[in-house]
Image (cartoon, rainbow, N blue to C red):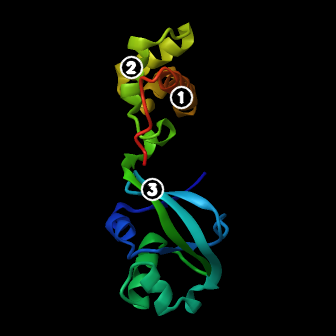
Amino acid sequence: MRHLKFDGRYREAILSGRKRATVRAGKVNLREGDEVFIHAGGYVLGRARIRRVERKSIEELTEEDAIKDGFSSREELLRALREHYPNLRGEVTVVEFELVERSRPVLSSELPYEGNSPLEIARMALKHLDLDQEDERLIRLFLKEGSLRKAAYKLGGMNRRYLIRDALRRAYKELKEKGLMDSKIG
């Protein structure tokens, strides 16, 4: 599933339904009917369905576009766009969406684990699972460092994060199968 990310200041407007659209610079790789996870300020707020995707010039933006985007006027929308995209020129994409499922706000980093904390998964895995040697080594390193970023640097760089994420996903899957963890999204 794809992701539609917003600055944290738009969180309440999204949750209240006041913000039902977004205007993005350039072309957006979304189509009507797509389902996406909605993020704001690093938290996943729920799932949304894309209702409309339309390319327009900046000059073609309307009051209606602004109101659907949670702004009180076209001028307010244009000010926000200039703030987000200081060098904005040419075309934008208006994306209308409908929040179809809310979840408790979940940190984006917890999404692959259905809202469960990666640190909690690591602790539970070491306590309850018979991990292979490599997964155990990666999970112990992650717990010792306290973050994916720090553990990845110990492994040789940020491009090594996938090793830890994969080990955590395998552990989470096994913990779920054993009934030791459940999804917290929804």
> Which badge, 1 or 2, is on the more N-terminal residue?
2
Three-letter amino acid code of the residue under disc 3? Gly
- Using the numbered discs, state the Cα–Cα distance from disc 3 to disc 2 in whole angstroms: 26 Å
Give the residue at the far front of this rendering: 179
**Whether residue 80 can be seen here:** yes
Residue depicted at x 46% and y 74%: 20
Three-letter amino acid code of the residue under disc 1? Arg
* Within-10-Å neighbours for mark 2: few <14, some 14–19, many 20+: some
Q: Is residue 18 above or below residue 161?
A: below
Three-letter amino acid code of the residue under disc 2? Met
Residue depicted at x 32% and y 66%: 12
* Within-10-Å neighbours for mark 3: few <14, some 14–19, many 20+: many
Determine the secondary structure under disc 1: helix
> Which badge, 3 or 1, is on the more N-terminal residue?
3
- Using the numbered discs, state the Cα–Cα distance from disc 3 to disc 1 in whole angstroms: 21 Å
Determine the secondary structure under disc 3: strand
* Circle 2 residue: 124
Residue 27: x, y in percent? 65, 70
Q: Which mark is residue 46?
A: 3
